[in-house]
Image (cartoon, rainbow, N blue to C red):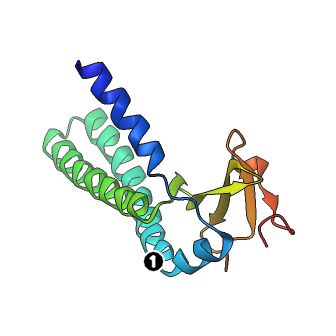
Amino acid sequence: MDAFETVSLSGLLAGLNRKFFSLSEANRSLPLVRRVVADIIRDYEQLCVLHSACKAHDVSGDLQRAEEARERYARVTDHLSELQEELEKIGCEIKDYRIGLVDFPALLDGREVYLCWQAGEDRVTHWHENEAAHTGRRPIAHEFS
């Protein structure tokens, strides 16, 4: 088996182990998801500030401060990756770091869809097709009862 087959096979096996959430399971996971997403939003805001600082220090020629900002940027990026992995272990996916948009894989009539939650919402109240983005969110009616 070559490297390409190994990568392809591992991707296929990961899909077989994919967790699908019921609406109640997604809502039960929210206490932990909320905490992780709050950290993601905070870190992402910090990352944006650090990115601007790096550029400003580069332009001004302050190489020492630019390097310090880049080092902090790298640490925050690493932490964001850890937070994203934590969500992936739960079984959900962060879709927007800025607003804290999270998708939970689910099944509806035998097809894969996403239950969708955004920071600030009390519970999971929307869903969308796999191909649809945040703008394709639909309120949950009877589909997942």
Q: Is residue 65 left or right of residue 101?
A: left
Q: Which residue is more in the foreground, 127 or 71?
A: 127
The N terminus sits in image quarter: top left
Q: What is the tally of numbered marks visible in this picture?
A: 1
Position in image of residue 63 (x %, y %): 16, 38
Residue extending furthest right? 141
Q: Which residue is found at the position 30% from the left and 20% from the top?
A: 4
Residue 96 visible at all: no
Image quarter of residue 120: bottom right
Q: Is residue 27 left or right of residue 132?
A: left
Amino acid at the residue labelled 1: Leu
Q: Which residue is more in the foreground, 24 or 52?
A: 24
Q: Which residue is found at the position 28% from the left and 27% from the top?
A: 6
Position in image of residue 44 (x %, y %): 42, 56
Residue extending furthest left? 64
Q: Which residue is found at the position 56% from the left and 80% from the top?
A: 28
In the image, residue 140 above or below residue 54:
below
Numbered disc 1: secondary structure: helix
Image quarter of residue 118: bottom right
Q: Give the residue pinned by disc 1.
A: 32
Q: Which residue is found at the position 44% from the left and 76% from the top?
A: 35
Q: Which residue is more in the foreground, 46 or 23?
A: 23
Residue 73 visible at all: yes
